[in-house]
Image (cartoon, rainbow, N blue to C red):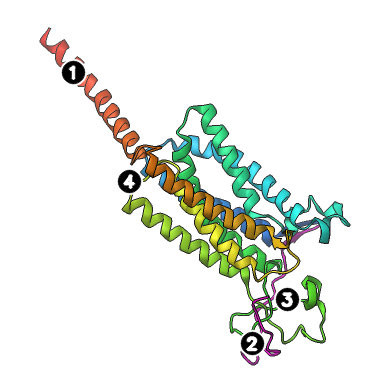
Amino acid sequence: MPYEYCGKTAVAGYHPPVIDPIALRLGPLEIHWYGIIIASAILGAAMFGTREVRRRGEDVDAGWSMLLWIILFGVLGARIYHVIHEWGTIYSAHPELILQVWKGGLGIPGAIAAGAAALWVYTRRMGMPSGGWLDIFAMAIPLGQAIGRLGNFVNQELYGPPTDLPWGIPIDAAHRIGDWTNLSTFPVDTTRFHPLFAYEALLSLLTLGILFWASRRFAAWLYDGDLLLIYLMGYGASRAYLETFRVENWTIGGLPTAIWLGLAAVVLAGGFLILRHMRGWGTPGAWMERLRAKTDAAAATADEPAADSAGAGAG
């Protein structure tokens, strides 16, 4: 475990807030902050993705129609991944909690896999360029991740080991896991923990910055699907590193599953990115070619009435 507990709070008298997970109560109806934040994350990612759709000259309405399927399968995949991840510690004993998504528990690897699969099937059925739309998907995901991770703060989840750093966060006794449930060693009033959700949010924004820069700087060189591969490399590396701070992980061969997945994403996505460019398995700047063709077609269509009018006048 990459930490050493120092036994005191880094800043005397510093008490970060613990937020009530329920934002609003209307009689028996409870509206949770987690749901509000996840909805905001989806909306923010969708709006950012819409700008990229317009820039590439794709159909905005088709994008919003596709989004419904991506959300549906993305949430389903995220929940399935989380339930499998926490089956031995939570859901095997309390299966009634599986459907209680509002209490938290959405695994991003599952959301990425299921959301990307839904997008691929939809675009293939509709005759749309799957690789190009997957790139748009990859551009939007990191922003959604960064916003959505704030929900982990409200639910007091996705935290790391105790720390004396000034940005450490409090975790109450009910949300402690592992050795940290020992309140004699780790008192609630003075113990602060690494906010892994915040680290992942910052790394997601860094990944977004890299994607944004690469999509402009190398637009004429990139193939359809390259941005998705770059995203997978960035997220895989970030997740593999952050997973070393967590405890009670779902493991395979003694190593957390998320580390296996993260490293696999880096190696496979990076290897395929290099190989496809070495072999020429794609068209450089394909989306620019499609945009140019659409622009030329629109210009030709606009010229037809003028030509018809001229011909009628000459007659």
* In the image, residue 292 above or below residue 157: above
Residue at the spot of label 2: 14
Residue 182 is left or right of residue 298, and the answer is right
Circle nearer the N terminus (4, 2) = 2
Q: Which amino acid does label 3 sit on?
A: Ile
Circle nearer the viewer, 4 or 2: 4
User: Is residue 185 something that shows in the picture?
Assistant: yes
Q: Which of marks 2 and 1 is in front?
A: 2
Q: Which disc is residue 307 wearing?
A: 1
Asked if the magenta segment contains residue 248, the reply would be no
Q: Give the range drawn in magenta.
A: 1-27
Element assignment for label 4: loop
Residue of label 3 = 171
For marks 3 and 2, give the CA distance: 14 Å
Residue 266: give its label: none
Q: Name the residue under label 4.
A: 221
Q: Earlier in the sequence, mark 4 or mark 3?
A: 3
- For image coordinates 83% across by 55% down, the residue present is 91
Q: How far apart are marks 4 and 1 (CA)?
A: 38 Å
